Amino acid sequence: MQAASIIEFDFEWRPLHNYLKAQGIAPPALPQVAGEGTPQLPSETLYDWMVLNSRDATDGLRLGEHYRISDYGVAGLALLSAECVDDALKVVKTYMLLFNKDIAEIRIEQSTPDEVRIAIGLNSRPGWSEQARLFHANVLASASFKLFKDLLRDDFELLALTLPANPGDVRPYQEYFRQPVRFRGSGIVFHLPAQLLKTPIPTANPAVFQTALALAGESFNDLLEREMGGLKQRVVALLDSLPERYPDIRWTAQHLKMTERTLRRRLAEENCSYREIIDQARQARAQRLLANAQLSIEQIGALLGYADSSSFRHAFRRWTGQSANLYRQRHSGKP
């Protein structure tokens, strides 16, 4: 299978079948249905059938529990290896908007200094009843809730949740989410502590994260790049994941699936160069090593790719206006 198509695999099929099996429901024999000239994935056809034949909207909460990060292949690998919740949300937003036709938008907003809101706008397919739309909203709310808990190993605090207007009994929702649930509007809003965005993910692994992105399709990477703040930030994250000396621009361009000329041009459009990014990356790593590691100045210079310690010392003084020895004394207590 080509790397560009790996992320387009029908990941939704497994959780749907697991839910039907748990409920003792035999999956129907459904043909592929064309939608706007493009055949639906088998999971899209099956999900549409499940929504239309749901017995109770709250059954969507139980269906959402069957969505697991490990079912999502390369995208799931990127989620599990992301450095913090904020980075994971960028992956989620990119994946959902690219591959999930039932989600109209995802917005991450700082509502107060202490609260952040993640708002999910929903698309409704033609022919869905009010109960079907509520069932669908419940699936997405439950699946998102489970994703947060799985990423953070249940160390997850939810302040409140807003779901589409529901005239029925609210008690099942209060019991399920164990937090206040409001019913208004047409989308889903998670109300979360603002500091949650910077919470480290226990399974974070920058090298694995970059490998997952290298395996993903071009469209996914283009959208994620924009979510990350541009190509410069994408390159910075890649370099930060490498434990050894920094690669030349040719290697980086190949890893990002573009030509060296394209990489130079696109960085120039963001008013920077590869040389400048390398220089900034070296400075940041040098400061971390001097403050936290028990390495000598000579060893740190070699790790950063300098031919000798004097070249590294000169570069460090240019970056910070002080010597490497003085910086170490002030930040690590080492004489």
Image: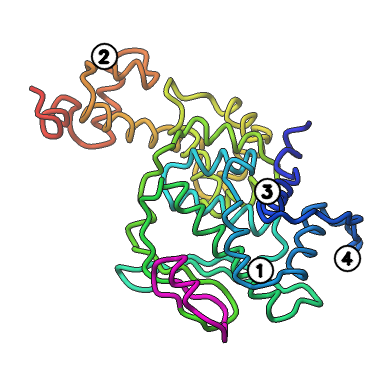
Q: Is residue 269 left or right of residue 233?
A: right
x and y percentages locating residue 92 in the rendered image: 57, 53
Cβ atoms under marks 1 and 4 closer than 8 Å = no
Does dot 2 land on a helix, a strand or a loop? helix
Looking at this view, is 188 or 78 the one in front?
188
Q: Nearer the viewer, mark 1 or mark 3?
A: 3
Name the amino acid type tagged 1.
Answer: His
Query: Residue 218 vs residue 288: left or right?
Result: right
Task: Judge whether 14 appears above or below 247 on screen.
Answer: below
Q: Amino acid at mark 3?
A: Asn
The residues colored magenta run 161-181
Name the mark on residue 136: 1
Tell me which residue sits at (64%, 57%) in the image.
Answer: 96
| Residue 140 against residue 130 in the figure, above or below | above
Residue 227 occupies quadrant:
bottom right
Q: Secondary structure at mark 1?
A: helix
Which disc number belongs to residue 18?
Answer: 3
**Residue on which the image places disc 2:** 298
Alpha-carbon span between mark 3 and mark 2? 57 Å
